[in-house]
Image (tube, rainbow, N blue to C red):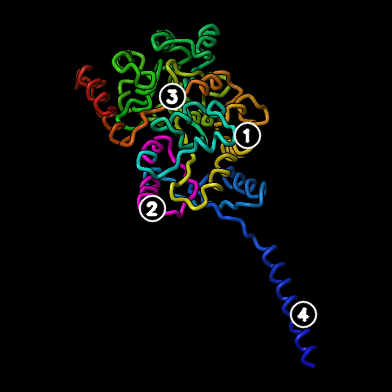
Amino acid sequence: MKKRVSLLLAIVMVFMAFCGFGMSVNADTRTVIKFAAQDDSTPATQVLIDEFNKSQNKYKVEWVKMTNDSGQMHDQLMTSLSSGSSEYDVISMDVVWAGEFAAAGFISPIDMNMYKDGLQKNLYNAGSMTAGSYMGKQYTLPYFPDLGLLFFRSDIVSATDAAKLVTGNYTYDDLYNMAKSYKGKRGTTDGFVFQAKQYEGLTCNVTEFTGGLTDLKAGLETMKKFVTSDFVPKDILNYTEAETHNSFINGKSVFARNWPYQYGMLADAPVKTYQVGIAPLPKGSTVGGWLLGINKNSKNAEGAWEFIKYTSGWTGQMIMSRKGAYLPGYNYLLTDERVENPLLSYEGLQNAMKATISRPISASYSKVSDTIQVNVHKYLSGGQDLNTTVTNINNALK
């Protein structure tokens, strides 16, 4: 009898162990990777995460949705990272935060990861890679890039001038002369509009006019030449992106410096896409957009890297481009017809993507940008001389 009971108990225990084992197989035991990123008005980010999770059985990415207010998100991340928290594994960040986060030791360098996986920097958008580099080390890969562009009225600008613009092989003096010459054609009132108000947009424009702040004096002199011309609006020093796109899409300006989103506004505007050309800016286009990095305190750094590698690579960037119309940060996709992004059909955009430049990479970026904005706006409005302006900016850049 005792033997039967013992045998029965043994059978039950084996059965329970087997069932328990079966349950653990069916349960998702993958390592969870926490991804801190803003909400996405398109399906792209969710599709990206779902496809990564289906592509392998070791990691499961969970999206921690952050506020869409960039300033607030920056502060949230700073609070978390400065406390040494590991609540986020992968961090999405505005391109201008990377230097600050790297200098503070909040994110890990990825050079060895790239080396082990045979990834070269030239696979990715140049401006994004520069923005994510600090003190000779690479800290990020592109999530999605953005960049400044020159929009122009192709139904006004001559074929010869348009061809020159599209290559990017022209100067700001050439643009000045064209804007002056074409102003007034087809009902336009302005030759050129851009962002000259005292805010972050001015820093982006200064970066472009000065070739990445490499020639401050000449670049700022050129900016003032435009500001004081008779072919820009009298209130150009109050222009942001909104005033710029309103001017262009409503047929008031021949040329406009703005971001790619302006193209999407043409669908319901007086000016249509077939009337518009796109070109690089003469000394390079300021890169915007977002980057991906690994929290230095992540307990799942290997999985974080695998997700970043996937997201910034061919598959991930294809998903972001097709599902969200984001510009790809993986260069091979720039000429891949399967991306199905109408902007990529423009040769001028293709050329601009290859000639991006970054704003200053600094551990104190906010202070540097503020110095640029304040001093340049004073100079452009006539309240400060050029030499003082250049000296103050150079001191901030040191």
The mark that comes first in sequence, 1 or 2, is 2
* Left or right of 367, for residue 306: right
The mark that comes first in sequence, 4 or 3, is 4
15 or 122: nearer the viewer: 15
Q: Which mark is residue 11?
A: 4
The amino acid type of the residue labelled 2 equals Gly
Crowd band around label 4 with a 10 angstrom C-alpha radius: few (<14), some (14–19), many (20+):
few
Query: Disc 1 to disc 3, how far (Cα)?
Result: 23 Å
The mark that comes first in sequence, 1 or 3, is 1
Magenta segment, which residues? 73-101
Q: Which mark is residue 314?
A: 1
Image position, residue 261 (x, y; %):
50, 31
Q: Is residue 4 above or below residue 46?
A: below
The mark that comes first in sequence, 3 or 2, is 2
Image position, residue 74 (x, y; %):
38, 45
For numbered disc 2, what is the local secondary structure? loop
Viewer-nearest of labels 1 and 2?
Answer: 2
